[in-house]
Amino acid sequence: MSATSGEKPIAFLDLPAQQKRLGPALKKRIDTVLEHCRFVLGPEVTELEERLAAWSGVGHCVGVSSGTDALQIVMMAENIGPGDAVFLPAFTYTATAEVPLVLGATPVFVDVDPQTFQIDPASLRARIAAVKAAGKLTPRAIVGVDLFGQPAPWEELRAIAAEERLFLLDDCAQAFGGVYRGRPLGGEAVATTLSFFPSKPLGGYGDGGAILTDDAERAELYRSLRTHGEGKTRYEVLRTGMNGRLDTLQAAVLLAKLDGFREELARREAIACAYDAGLAGVAQVPVRVPESASAWAIYSILLKDEAQRAATQARMRDAGVPSAIYYPLPLHHQPAYRDHHDGVALPVSEALSKRILALPIHPELTDAEVARVISAVRG
Ligand SMILES: *Cc1c(COP(=O)(O)O)cnc(C)c1O
């Protein structure tokens, strides 16, 4: 057992090693900001916005304070509020569901695909039909989440959104750097939201986020909303907004990280392939969405049941190998959300929560550490 035999525990996220790898380029970027002191909406924010828009092949990028605020700004721009239904997967991070509620709207939870864990179009159609039949809420928007770094089923989501006249939003917090049908993620929906939380594939050293869109009018609205609803001048207030700007220091960190981001993505992919090969037959390894490349925010395996997962996690812990559970409860069972749920069973999300287990996949992992993870899972 490595924890007792002197082998160094493996980190789930290794920010000290990452800093060492980035080296002087990171310090130089930060020092530049300390010199010019334009800490709010400084030149690094504009530079980052331009580079992210170019990366994704979309017209506009608006840097904001977090992935959660990105979702909120996009929904505020659509006037989503009381009486509105926002359809989103039950198997995702809490922020996706939190934002509609903060705005007074109702999240309507949709089940996910048992293979890819992405939102299930058949369940989405059923949930929309149920809301329409009940007649209490107005269907307004669909949030597709690119879960764990892989794309949601965008063709089907776009078709359903068009048929039902719903606004389509991509919560891409976990998947910037991913590719779908030859295109970088970022242009699949009317608006795409990113998060730069430190553990995301493109992570900063604090909170941060961005909104991508091809729609110039919406981009301008997002810029206004992130700065208190301001108009052409700072003291013209056109609408109720928020303080939701991306910090200049975070933009500087992200610019330094962006230079080596392609190599990081390649390293994550190599680790994923090594896990696939080493764990096939012991657990269900991630099923790839066809014609896509994952950003590998999270690499999750499926164990047989809750007991096998607990045993695997304990064995890994003893070997100094970390693991995590995304997500231990589907959102419709969370105390904060269950009273907003209509009680419908979402069996895939419920079953996944009991069997899923995430392995470390950050780019600083060495081949020897990857081998240790595999042998700890295999037991
Ligand atoms: C991380 C995350 C968010 C929220 O991003 P923050 O920057 O932490 O606010 C939203 N949605 C999903 C799916 C996430 O994983």
Image (cartoon, helix red, strand yellow):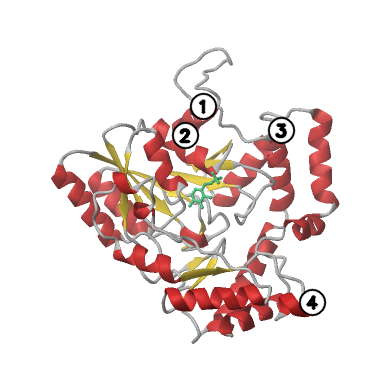
Q: Any atom of ligand 1 within 8 Å of the CB at mark 2?
A: no
Q: Is residue 325 found left or right of 119 in the rendered image?
A: right
Element on which disc 4 rests: loop
Looking at marks 1 and 3 on the same chain, the residue that comes earlier in the sequence is marked by 3
Q: Tell me whether circle 1 and circle 2 mark residues in contact (CB < 8 Å).
A: yes
The residue singled out by tag 3 in the image is 43
Q: Residue at x 59, y 68 (%)?
A: 323
Element on which disc 1 rests: loop
x then y, percent, for residue 62: 56, 37
The residue singled out by tag 4 in the image is 6
Q: In which quarter of the image is the C terminus?
A: bottom right
Above or below, 274 against 363 in this view is below
Asked if residue 215 can be seen in this view, the reply is no
Q: Tell me whether circle 3 and circle 2 mark residues in contact (CB < 8 Å).
A: no
What is the CA distance from the residue labelled 1 to the residue labelled 2?
8 Å
The residue singled out by tag 2 in the image is 73
Above or below, 83 against 153 in this view is above
Tag 3: amino acid: Pro
Q: Which residue is drawn at 32% across and 60% down?
A: 111
Q: Tell me whether circle 1 and circle 3 mark residues in contact (CB < 8 Å).
A: no
